[in-house]
């Protein structure tokens, strides 16, 4: 059998070792402790620097795997703590601390991850970006934006767009934007690079006015322009896009979002499904 069931439905007590047991947590952290009791779904331990102190508890919901001071590996398998047949080699350093070879360590994947993080940090030395959405000219608007990368690697960015009308009358739009602003969260799953994919939600407040006309046909065609009505809309979209790095300072971006727009004053009206897009050029600093 590849695995040995350590405990079925009863606790097993372990003697307190003079060496540390290492518990690897699911959040990526690890702690060095003295385990005094292992059960099927939890462990009891004491702190290394306070062996006579209180007893603490960890459950399988938090545990990834454990390497005991003896070298035995305890794995979380399907919500139960399972012991491996094989043990790992134990070595002593000059500082009298325990080191080991991690049986779950994948060198190739770890190397790829480190390279991706280092590359992302390299491309993320400039965390601020000012952008211009030249696709806004289609609706006779001007849209500028500011984005700030929040973390060291460049996985999360926060963007604030500002859009306003240029004052040019158009006939092909039912609604004319007066002013739009809001907040956009950009999540970069692979960090920053020459080509970076991002996704995330957008929340906008939009002030718009009607641009409708009615034409009465008869012996004489008469066009009557309805008095424009101004409305405030709350809009929510899910966005997907990409950034291309043309130089250390210059970036080009494309994105498209799908969502809903709701008139805040007219609660009886249904939400309107719509699509938004962006074609931008940005300066990064």
Image: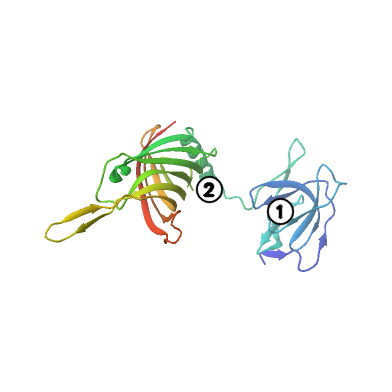
For the N terminus, give its image quadrant.
bottom right
Q: Total label count?
A: 2
Residue name at image x 15 percent, y 56 percent: 221
Residue name at image x 77 percent, y 51 percent: 70
Between 267 and 141, the residue placed more toward the observer is 267
Residue name at image x 55 percent, y 46 percent: 110
Image location (x, y in percent) of residue 33: 77, 48
Q: Is residue 182 visible?
A: yes
Label 2 vs label 1, nearer the camera: 1
Residue 124, numbered circle: none
Q: Residues within 10 Å of mark 1 (few under 14, many from 20)?
A: many
Q: Is residue 147 above or below residue 41?
A: above
Q: Which residue position holds label 2?
A: 108
Image location (x, y in percent) of residue 172: 25, 51
Q: Residue furthest front?
A: 219
Q: Residues within 10 Å of mark 2 (few under 14, many from 20)?
A: few
Q: CA distance from mark 2 to mark 1?
A: 22 Å
Q: Is residue 102 above or below residue 269?
A: above
Label 1 sits on a secondary structure element that is strand
Q: Are marks 2 and 1 in contact (CB under 8 Å)?
A: no
Image location (x, y in percent) of residue 124: 48, 36
Image location (x, y in percent) of residue 52: 88, 46
Q: Which residue position holds label 1?
A: 66
Q: Quadrant of residue 41?
A: bottom right
For the C terminus, give its image quadrant.
top left
Between 285 and 67, the residue placed more toward the observer is 285
Q: Is residue 198 visible?
A: no
Label 2 sits on a secondary structure element that is helix
Q: What is the image's colouring?
A: rainbow
């Amino acid at each position: 059998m590849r695995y040995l069931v350590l405990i079925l439905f009863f606790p097993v007590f372990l003697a307190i070792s003079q060496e540390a047991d290492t518990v690897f947590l699911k959040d990526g952290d690890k702690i060095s402790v003295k385990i005094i009791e292992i059960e099927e779904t939890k462990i009891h331990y004491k702190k290394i620097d306070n062996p006579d102190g209180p007893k603490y508890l960890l459950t399988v919901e938090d545990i990834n795997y454990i390497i005991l001071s003896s070298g035995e590996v305890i794995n979380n398998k399907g919500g139960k703590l399972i012991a491996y047949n094989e043990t790992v080699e134990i070595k002593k350093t000059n500082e009298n601390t325990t080191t080991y070879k991690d049986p779950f360590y994948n060198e190739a994947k770890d190397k790829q991850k480190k390279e991706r993080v280092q590359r992302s940090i390299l491309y993320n030395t400039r965390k601020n970006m000012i952008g211009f959405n030249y696709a806004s000219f289609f609706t006779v608007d001007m849209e500028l934006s500011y984005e700030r990368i929040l973390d060291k690697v460049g996985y999360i960015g926060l963007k604030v767009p500002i859009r306003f009308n240029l004052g040019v009358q158009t006939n092909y739009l039912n609604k004319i934007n007066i002013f739009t602003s809001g907040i956009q969260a950009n999540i970069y799953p692979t960090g920053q690079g020459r080509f970076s994919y991002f996704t995330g939600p957008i929340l906008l407040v939009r002030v718009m006015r009607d641009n409708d006309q009615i034409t009465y046909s008869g012996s004489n065609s008469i066009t009557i322009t309805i008095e424009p009505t101004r409305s405030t809309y709350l809009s929510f979209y899910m966005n997907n896009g990409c950034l291309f790095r043309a130089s250390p300072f210059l970036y080009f971006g494309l994105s498209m979002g799908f969502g809903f727009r709701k008139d805040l004053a007219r609660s009886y009206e249904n939400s309107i499904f719509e699509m938004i897009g962006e074609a931008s050029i940005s300066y990064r600093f």
